[in-house]
Amino acid sequence: MALFRRKKTEIAPVEAVRGIPMAEVPLRTSVTVCGKVTRMRTRPAHGVPALVVTLRDETGFVTAIWTGRRTIGGIALGRTICLEGVGTKASDGITFMNPAYTLVK
Amino acid sequence: MKIVIAGAGSVGRYMAKQLAASGHTIVIIDNDASAVFRLQSTDSITSFQGDACEVDVLAASGAAEADVVAAVTGDDEDNLVISLLSKQEFGVPRVVARVNNPNNEWMYNEMWGVDVSVSTPHLLTGLVEEAVTEGSLVRLMAFDHGKSGLNEVTLADGSPAINQTIGSLQLPREATVVAVLRDGHVVAPALDTVLHAHDEVMVLSSGDCEAAIRAALIGSK
């Protein structure tokens, strides 16, 4: 059973991953978005940590939340990454919960 | 609204019937074909045989368009997996999950995708306490991940609130009286409602203000 998404840790060249503009992310549909990490913070959610990362492209921003983690190797400020997952509407824009990710060169 | 119910036991079937009667569209999933077929499919109820812990089964049941997913199987592990998948893979806005063993309740939170958890043992304990105690604060229901709750106090003879108006009670800002039950009738609370002994006062509260509610309605003993 694929309870957690497989973490894509390989580093892909940017042209190999095609994302959609962040301003056009549809809700509740599986999509890929790519952008630069502009904000990272850890949040204690009910005693368990969560890593909250904001990604930006030219059109807007999305937020990714990985529950149960404080850091993810390879994800750092200024790094470009691609996310694959389902976007939901949160109070501050679109949020992806535990998305799969690809580090981009 | 479209509601997906995982688990067609007595709880799931009852929910399906009640919710369909109030006009919602229901899909009910269970692994056990005989449980599913005990509930006849109607216009508003679709029964579906499959393992709701599988992404494909949830997708086929229409979780991607569901407004609510209710994980009400008799197994806490299954309920948590269903909640997590509903939230993570389908972005379901509201996920309700049933707690079977109260020892597992601590896991029913945001991390597992649960918005609201319902624990029968906790509800029963609250109701029993409420029936046998006078002059103590009983938490009937918790919501918003336990941050808010509905509390009940039956006013004992020595309570400082007796013969006081609701407006003059020293209740904290986070608490409000939502109803008063007197002799089996509901009294809509107004600022000038005077409280009597043996009134059941319902207080909705958020945050940690139990001590202040106790001081206002029960007093120090």
Image (cartoon, rainbow, N blue to C red):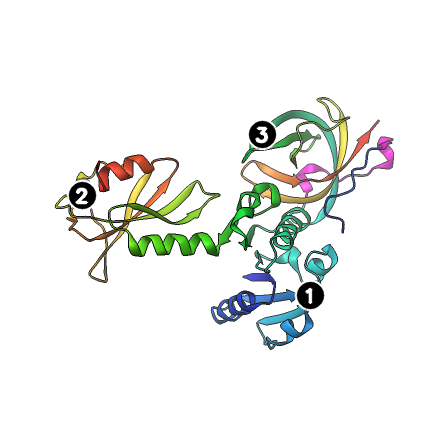
Q: Which residues are magenta?
A: A10-25
Dot 1 corresponds to which residue? B31
Query: Mark 2 or mark 1, which is nearer the start of the sequence?
Result: 1
Real-space CA distance between mark 3 and mark 2, rounded to the nearest whole angstrom:
42 Å
Q: Is residue B35 magenta?
A: no
Determine whether the residue tagged by mark 1 lies in a helix, strand or loop.
loop
Assess disc 3: are there few (<14), some (14-19) or many (≥20) residues with their C-alpha within 10 Å of its C-alpha: some
* Nearest to viewer (mark 3 / mark 1): 1
SS type, badge 3? strand
From the viewer's side, name the closer residue of B76 and B182.
B76
Q: Secondary structure at mark 2?
A: loop
Q: Give the residue displayed 57% in from the left and 40% down from the top.
A: A90
Whether the residues at callouts 3 and 1 have beta carbons within 8 Å, the answer is no
Which residue is denoted by mark 3 in the rendering? A43
Disc 3 from disc 1: Cα separation: 37 Å
The count of marks equals 3
Q: Position of residue A15 (x, y in %)?
A: 86, 34
**Dividing the image into 4 quarters, which one contains the N terminus of chain B?**
bottom right
- Foreground residue among B106 and B47: B106
Question: Who's the residue at 75% across and 43% down the image?
Answer: A5
- Residue B188 picture location, percent across and down: 23, 54
Q: Are marks 3 and 1 on the same chain?
A: no
